[in-house]
Amino acid sequence: MGQKMGFYKRDKIRNYSRENERHRVVIVGAGFGGLWAIKTLTRYPVDICLIDQNNYHTFFPLLYQVAAAELEPEDIAYPVRSIVRGFPNVRFLLAKVNKIDLKAQIIETDVRTVHYDFLILAIGSVTHFFNIKGAKYVYPLKTLEQAIDIRNQILTCFEKAAYEPDEERQKSLLTFVIVGGGSTGVEFAGALAELTYGHMRRDYRNLDFGKVRVILLEAAGKLLPNLPDRLGNYARERLNRVKVEVRFNSKVSEVGPGEVKLTDGSVIRTYTTVWTAGVRGEPALNSWGLPLAPNGKVAVLNTLQIPGYPNAYVAGDLAYLEEGGRPLPMVAPVALQQGVAAGENIVRQISGKPPASFHYNDQGIMAVIGRRAAVAYLFNRFGFTGFPAWIIWLGVHLFRLIGFRNRLLVLTNWAWDYIYYERVVRLILPAKPPSEKHKEES
Amino acid sequence: MGQKMGFYKRDKIRNYSRENERHRVVIVGAGFGGLWAIKTLTRYPVDICLIDQNNYHTFFPLLYQVAAAELEPEDIAYPVRSIVRGFPNVRFLLAKVNKIDLKAQIIETDVRTVHYDFLILAIGSVTHFFNIKGAKYVYPLKTLEQAIDIRNQILTCFEKAAYEPDEERQKSLLTFVIVGGGSTGVEFAGALAELTYGHMRRDYRNLDFGKVRVILLEAAGKLLPNLPDRLGNYARERLNRVKVEVRFNSKVSEVGPGEVKLTDGSVIRTYTTVWTAGVRGEPALNSWGLPLAPNGKVAVLNTLQIPGYPNAYVAGDLAYLEEGGRPLPMVAPVALQQGVAAGENIVRQISGKPPASFHYNDQGIMAVIGRRAAVAYLFNRFGFTGFPAWIIWLGVHLFRLIGFRNRLLVLTNWAWDYIYYERVVRLILPAKPPSEKHKEES
């Protein structure tokens, strides 16, 4: 659609704007949705204010590699001001949103209050714990800080295990549980198995690696539920080969200090439970009067507008929209395309045209399982596994990483890893006081 | 001295050890002193235990570049286990030392108690605040975490200043004070000036950079007191040229929320006071019964032994030793050479020879002041300034950086910076809750 809006229409808007005040578009969230909306809008004479609580964009699809000590945080983060620097009509506000008032067209933040003519809400999703008990003992994997937390926790567990005289406690320290068999869970399990069984073995020569366990718990009966069975089966087989225990029909009921309880009554002793099982909309939205769909997401019109508020759009994970009778998945390509679409619809509205419906152009889904193995499902038709899928995955992700320099650094890290079979990112940093999560209650 | 200990002597020790138990050498601290001691000792049949509270070695001479967002933390840190991996007689213990009992030859840590036959204490130094009031409001620059803190604080000040309506408060946010005109202070001031006046200008287009101030406070009347006056004068001139205000005879009496008070009664409004003015020995040493010299350091014999404890050595910043009537400076080359000497003296003792005196081989002192400018003073004779000194500095530091890969990454960052004049490391990460240091008391 971007291509169809030629110079003619852009000039029309420019003239329109000259006669009027420039419209103020506020974009909340510097994820894929927000950034691609900016990319679309910045060519038009509007004033854009981008709000995010971090001063960097996180390349979420590779977040699990930071958690597995495979990439450094800086490899997948990029300063927002560097991204928007070239656009004179974009301002950045580092702030937390406290409240959105759709009627008054006002956003209250911890820094200042911002008024908008058009809004694109692209704040993504937060971890959904499905009411399990003891969620505070769980390590979610949703933000860069959480990924660093997980990395520190894994490395600290190995350091502690190296000098732990109590064998049972040592085994618990070396047991890592991942909850959720979607693509993040599968990818993280594969990377973690490589780290623990491969690279750590050389650093902890006196440790009995027969005690190390990586367990992937999935509530349903298959991995990668969005993909054809063949690919899920391949992922399972591949994970088994790298010694990941995959357990189906396993629901967590409670997490406590040092253990995970399942609904069937069984207990796994562990200090590290990583949660990739679900996401939902920001709970604070409840009080802002937005029309909520299941999972705390915002039910939008097929134009991505919020019902009743034609100048307010939602893009990315937060938008609930069905296509072909099924809700759209919460993946980067959807967010990115919705960001573009929301931006274009605002341009259409300004130039007096009705906003257009959004249609997702599904180019495929991928997941990587360790070295040289992946699954890819392209154009809803072609399934790949193994090395070819891995090459596709690598190419696509490198291509999508924002910033040429980041791309270079990531490539360097990977090449190094590939050639020397060496994980280089193993700093426990920042060294926080020993995790409070698992302090035994006394 | 290392060269003089040939195979003959090594064999003698080996035979000695075969008849006896292998001696256990405990090294506390993975800085330059500790690592070079290991490098020396690992060739001999002793069991080595290295203890540090971090799992990485910090390349201290470039720490200020992390604080100035010039390098990423990973560029100057290297996992200890990767360093010692090749040596089967070295074990690493990640732990905090709680107490050292020289008589019982025991070290108590938070993980376990360790016995030693020989000890090398190389724990470095800690920040010395000289009894100023409000030390908690000061940002020390002594550890990797502190450097990250400073980076986050500087970037956060710019973000806040961008939206600060109160002009006085905005000016305070944009004022950065550095206390101490030694090499760390001079180097950090130069790097900070480059960051604030150069790179930040492009990211904050609407900010009045006339309000930005970088102030370097020195208690004495010259910069770089260890070097000839000519070099100190050059540094001052160079800093003035990049708009750093250098103030001599300025002693801090008190730091409060939002301000620094000097002993002459004047007040500077700032939220960022970085302290490079002094270091001292770890205060806990007081209670461990070690013979303390001024500044909380340990007064050692010229063999680096602790008086009265012939099997206990001190190397690096913590050791107080005079040469030519002046105490040895606390710099990396001294620490490194003392680590080697302490290791060799232990070998001599094991093989029945008396330990030898330590003599510092002074190869020079250097400090860099931003792009293409530095001062270098080599072999106590040759002074260099400007670009030649910068090239010497660059070469020496790259050469000394542990780990080939780190060297590559640092070089990449620098080359990028040099060619594109672009600071790439500007993530506020981990994004902590807004600094408690300067919350105005209400």
Image (cartoon, coloured by chain):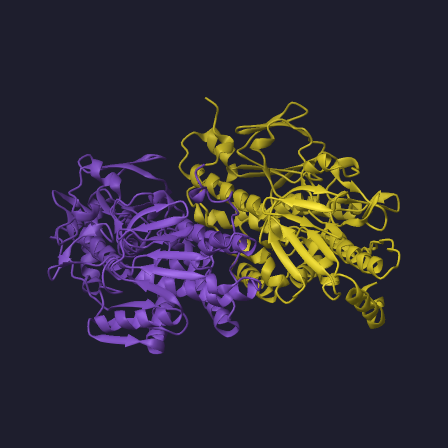
Chain colours: A yellow, B purple
Q: Outermost residue toward the bottom? A: B388
Residue A209 placed where, x, y %?
A: 50, 41
Nearer to the camera, A97 or A426:
A97
Image position, residue B421 (x, y; %): 50, 71
| Vertical side of A231 occupied by B225: above or below | below
Q: Position of residue B6 (x, y in %)?
A: 20, 62
Q: Depth check: A44 or B377 in front?
A: A44
A17 left or right of B102? right
Q: Is residue A391 visible?
A: yes
Quarter assignment of residue B219: bottom left
Q: Nearer the viewer, residue B401 or B435?
A: B435
- Left or right of A72? Residue A298 is right
Q: Is residue B325 left or right of residue B54?
A: left
Residue A225 percent location from the top left of the image = 76, 42
- Quarter of the picture containing the N terminus of chain A is bottom right
* Residue B403 visible: no
- Residue A441 falls left or right of residue A358: left
Identified at 70% across, 54% down, the residue is A34
Q: Quadrant of residue A180?
A: top right
Q: Tag count in the figure?
A: 0
Query: Quadrant location of residue A139?
Result: top right
Q: Quadrant of the C terminus of chain A?
A: top left
Q: Nearer the viewer, residue B127 or B261?
A: B261
